[in-house]
Amino acid sequence: MAKKTYDLLFKLLLIGDSGVGKTCILFRFSDNHFTTTFISTIGIDFKIKTVELRGKKIKLQIWDTAGQERFHTITTSYYRGAMGIMLVYDITNEKTFDDIVKWLRNIDEHANEDVEKMILGNKCDMEEKRVVSKDRGEAIAREHGIRFMETSAKANINIDRAFSELAEAILDKTAGRDADADHARIAVERRPSRAPPARACCS
Amino acid sequence: MNYEETKSVVQEKFLSSERVTAFLCDAKVLHPEWVKKDRLLCIVEYGDEKAVFCLFTSSYPPKSFTDLSIEIVLPIDNTFKCEIDNKPSDPEAVLYLNLQSRNNKFKFEIQMTPRVDNFVDDLFRGIEAVSKVPTQPEFVWLKKYHGKDEDDIITQFSVIPRSGVAHAQNSAPVAIRESLIKRKMYDKELEYTFTKKFTVFCGTWNVNDKSPVIPLEGWLSVDREPPDIYAVGFQELDLSKETFLFDQTFREDEWYNAVINYVDRRAKYVKLEKVRLVGMLLIVLIKQKYISHVRNVVCDTVGTGIMGKMGNKGGVSIRFDLHNTSMCFVNSHLAAHVEEYERRNQDFRDICNRTRFLQPNQQAKAIKDHDQIYWIGDLNYRITDLDPNTVKQLIKDNNFEKILEWDQLKQQHKNNNVFAGYTEGPITFKPTYKYDPGTDNWDSSEKNRAPAWCDRIFWKGEAISQLAYRSHPALNISDHKPVSATFSSSIKVIDEEKYRKVYEDVIKQLDKLENELIPQVKVDLTEIDFGTVKYLELQVRTITIKNIGKLPVEFEFIKKLDETSFCKEWLIVEPYKKCICADESCEIQLKVLINKTSACKINAGTDKLYDILVLHLYGGKDIFITVTGTYQRSCFGCSIEVLVNLNKPIKDVPVGKLIELENKRDQCVSNQSTYSIPKEIWFLVDHIYLHGLKEPNLFEQPGLHSEVLQIRDWLDSGSVDPIPGSIHSVAEALLLLLESTADPIIPYNLQSICLKASANYLQCKQIVMELPEFRKNVFLYLCEFLQEALQHSAENGLDAKTLSTLFGEIFLRDNPNQIQEPQSRINKQVIDKKKAQFVHHFLVNDHSDLIFTR
Ligand SMILES: Nc1nc2c(ncn2[C@@H]2O[C@H](COP(=O)(O)OP(=O)(O)OP(=O)(O)O)[C@@H](O)[C@H]2O)c(=O)[nH]1
Ligand SMILES: [Mg+2]
């Protein structure tokens, strides 16, 4: 009767321009909750959620990052250790879609080589304001060999699916590599070093 | 207020069932984040469980229980540790008490008083008591002191392992989650289980060293329906010395095979487990179709025989889970001899206390930790105080009730001396001991023992009903007759569908709890704009971090990748690290100060007043705090080569132009530049020359910081007003300006040559000749001025020695970027002397030949 709480822990990361809906996606997924007020994320935050995939309990630790331009250099230091990354753009905002290429480059430079990626075109509930067609989203994903999905945090479209698909992709990899997947194996590491600062601040 | 009165106040803080057994008034918590203020320490007892409480009191001593608030709760469980440090020589007579429980560690400072002994004694009594009880106490009563809901006992665990979520090497949180899930699932058992009746057959036989030479179905196969589970126990399987000494016997297989042969043939059985200790053998069989629902089969043996350890007496046990019900079977052979019933009681207790079922990754279980317990065996209790012949007569009359009144086991059981909480069914069969083997006749030896019901079956647990309890006299090869009982027992079976749903709900609840426990703070400002920042003018801003989560939060400003410090050198953050309790706030001061080092970098464009700090919450998120400001450019911190090129006040020079000049300063040549020395130096020197040469204590009395800042503004803005401030402030500004130039007047690479040449004026002159042009100009200009000043030594009190020391330090400024070997003080003195010596030549000798030669 002693079942494990979870078999695996996956660290996922949400990146993308400010305002595309990263925080909302995470809230919808973890709390099944949505709010229209925009409070831009100033930092890095995470939530956990346990899901079951193919009989395995998987604990997802999902990190939400600040999308604002000025934080880009800092946020890239959190990429390493992520096993899956969601790149989010806003289908009603051309620029956020154009920037996907930039975010992909960031991943190439800073994330683990074998990180699983997925592109999300968010706010697909706003059909009347759409400026990026689904075809274009699919095309760029195909070009880079990445999974793609259109989502809406507001209307709760594809949110659960997106996370399970990403987790499943990671599980496929993990299962192949590790026969002993029964043990909670956790590969998470935070970049900014926590060593004592070189300069203690006392006046 | 005396000790007893205070104690009764403390007692009021707790329920009456929770007794304060010891307490100390003057303890102090030693913790960097806690006020080292008086606390009360007390030990509280509830039933068998004890815990140490640390209380804060708002008035000292507390007048009412409302003055007290509970700060720390440390259950005395088997994780509890106590260490005492004391220094007997310490005149203060204090004692340090290190207490640890479940990953929480605290150090207390305690005043040595006679009460301390009491307290410490009580503490150790508590620790000892815990080490004796077989299972971990649950401390349910402590939950209310941890927080508002039942989950909070976990909350306090989480304080430490939180960071594990991010780091994860630490398995503690996983284990906690695990046990929490188990508990929650256990609480909700009714929601996902239904019960199903199983029949359980228990049989016991003391075979008195005999082999199974007769068929056993008359004992094992007598029920109308084949039982679902068999638990068959034997005693005195083999009385040979070899078995006793080496614990080996062929009889085990003989009897095991006999049992297998003679169990009910209508069903198919498989062995669940068997276990033997010397002559005690326990075999558990189950219908084949149920074996897949059996889990966690573990057995154990306990010897209570010779010296309380040997296996001639004792118990063997098997435990397992069938569906969702835990079952335990014990077969025991207790101490012999009529008068030894106390020994038998003790053997029972020893078996209970010493039997331990070890399972990987789980706490060891004791016999009592099971839903259902079946205890069989030759318990060896006899009939006392009745004459053997009377007993035999009563048996003949079938008057068992009368004899059972004198049965030691019935008596001991009734008084709760043994088998407390267990049940035994009514005995309707003749005593099973002692017969002449091969007959149904009572023992005919001259001992003439009274017959007795040595062989018995007890059970404990809900939903068990006994269907039969009997002996089987026809099996007569031993001096004992076999006994058996059949039970109908309710087993909890899991409804997979419902289980899943409940399980998912529990997981969801836990996820929610875990998310709520992630440290949460509110920072009132994440963008701090210092506005205009001026050279050497300190500015302070405050931000407030409020802990809005449920747990204490520890924050720290952490370094960004590839950076050596968590903030730029012009910024000071205080405190950069601290712990904030729930609902409390912490103010953090951010101070900006541009000194010469950062001014040079900003002037050259290699740094700017912009930084992003990473405020990290342990086990939680990071918050980015942006710091900005606009640096108002100043002549302080500029290069001499740049200053000579500025034909207008620095305030009017575009920032870009300044950066460009700084970066090209090496290419600066005289025929293009505006001045031969920086006008700012000239202004200051000229002012002193005109107004201050006779000023007493010139260059020795410090100026006012505020006036220096006014002079800075005067220079930077090119004001036409007279220079503000006193002569001393002007002199100070001059020194600060000379000290702040991006490069020293004598370049770093020439300094060691200067020091070597310091005794030789000619060589020194030679070096000065070779200085970069504008530095040479400044050097000679200042020496000229200082010579002038020395002319007035009678008034201003200057002498060449003092001045050369002062300016030696400025002209030959140490390179801050050079990693300095730790200099001895003597060495430093020698160097300073040489620097002074170098300058001294130019203060006492006529060097007009050097001036303006190119
Ligand atoms: N219509 C619609 N609006 C959405 C959706 N998702 C997010 N929004 C809105 O978009 C705005 C920004 O959402 P956030 O989730 O805070 O954006 P973000 O990506 O986290 O932004 P940063 O934290 O600055 O990086 C909010 O006002 C949301 O209400 C969606 O699916 N549909
Ligand atoms: Mg956000």
Image (cartoon, helix red, strand yellow):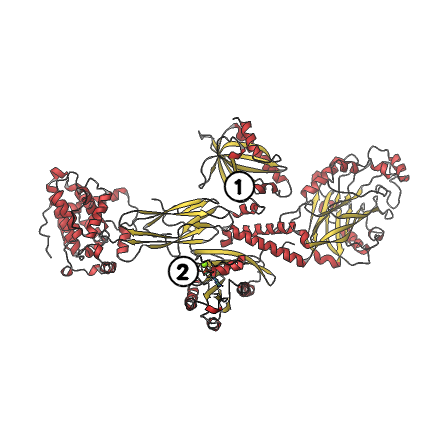
On what subunit does the disc labeled 2 rest? A
Q: Residues within 10 Å of mark 1 (few under 14, many from 20)?
A: some
| Badge nearest the viewer, 2 or 1 | 2
Q: SS of the residue at dot 2? A: loop
Q: Which residue is mark 2?
A: A68
> Can you say which quadrant of the picture contains the C terminus of chain B?
bottom left
Relative depth, front residue between B584 and B822: B584
Look at label 2 and name its amino acid. Answer: Gln
Judge from the rendering whether residue B397 lies leftward or rightward of residue B577; answer left or right: right
Query: Given the current orientation, which residue lies at the most extreme front position?
Result: A128
Q: Is residue B843 visible?
A: no
Q: SS of the residue at dot 1? A: strand
Judge from the rendering whether residue B87 lies leftward or rightward of residue B784; answer left or right: right
Residue B100, disc = 1
Q: Position of residue B530 (x, y in %)?
A: 32, 51
On what subunit does the disc labeled 1 rest? B
Q: Position of residue A170 (x, y in %)?
A: 53, 64
Relative depth, front residue between B380 and B74: B74
The verdict on label 2 being within 8 Å of ligand 1 is yes
Q: Residue at x 67, y 58 (%)?
A: B496
